[in-house]
Image (cartoon, rainbow, N blue to C red):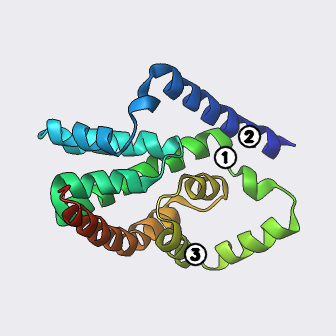
Amino acid sequence: MQAYKRILLVLAFLALLLGAFELSGLREHFNLAFVHQAITEHKLSGLLIFIALFCLGNLLHIPGLIFLAAAVLAFGKLWGGLATYIAAVASCILTYFTIRLIGGNALRELKNPYAARIFGQLDRHPVKSIILLRTLFQTMPTLNYVLSLSGVRFYQYLLGTLLGLPLPIALYCIFFDYVGKSLHLS
């Protein structure tokens, strides 16, 4: 029963965060153009603004591709990719500690045979599993929440994240650079 209460706390936190985001008026402006403008108008603090927006967006379940596209269009594929990698890792770390603080290992404590099989695989190969998940789903907010609540250790989470993100970020950088040049956006 305690696990369900912690999952409800995580959901309440997300609802509160979404409510604050909505009431602040930020939601209306949180798009590719807004992120691009925020990082190009503030050359010195652009990277910090970008990281902060990425972290907030990830907690709010806003897809990371919006941030990656904005970074590539603002900084080019090399520096945009590096900025995205740094922001993505920072965002995953923030999400891990925030959600773990609120929800602990709640998913691990659920008595469900299907979940037990998934956790068994995660326990046998935690870093490999996280690398594969990051390669396929990058910084997908739901993945971050689930991994945070799964009981996986932080060093495994971090190592899997560090090793799993470069390939998809590089591929998306090439794609967004191509699209940006084709549409004369960059």
- Identify the element where label 2 is drawn: helix
Q: Residues within 10 Å of mark 2 (few under 14, many from 20)?
A: many
Seen in the picture, residue 161 relative to 68 is either above or below; the reply is below
Tag 1: residue type? Gly
Kindly check if marks 2 and 3 are in contact, taking CB atoms under 8 A apart as contact. no
Tag 3: residue type? Ser
Location of the C terminus (image quadrant): bottom left
Give how far across and how far down residue 173 sits, in percent: 29, 67
Q: Nearer the viewer, residue 158 or 52?
A: 52
Could you say which quadrant of the image residue 43 lies in? top left
N-terminal of the pair, mark 1 or mark 3, is: 1
Kindly check if marks 1 and 3 are in contact, taking CB atoms under 8 A apart as contact. no
Give how far across and how far down residue 158 sits, in percent: 45, 62
Q: Residues within 10 Å of mark 3 (few under 14, many from 20)?
A: some
Query: Which residue was labeled with disc 3?
Result: 129
- Identify the element where label 3 is drawn: helix
- Identify the element where label 1 is drawn: loop
Tag 2: residue type? Arg
How far apart are the two marked residues, 1 and 2, measured between alpha carbons? Answer: 7 Å
Q: What label does residue 9 carry, if any?
A: none
Q: Which residue occupies 44% across, 68% down?
A: 159
Kindly check if marks 1 and 2 are in contact, taking CB atoms under 8 A apart as contact. yes
- Closer to the observer: label 1 or label 3? 3
Query: Which residue was labeled with disc 2?
Result: 6
How far apart are the two marked residues, 1 and 3, measured between alpha carbons? Answer: 20 Å
Q: Nearer the viewer, residue 100 or 47?
A: 47
Seen in the picture, residue 115 relative to 30 is either above or below; the reply is below
N-terminal of the pair, mark 1 or mark 2, is: 2
Q: What label does residue 104 carry, if any?
A: 1
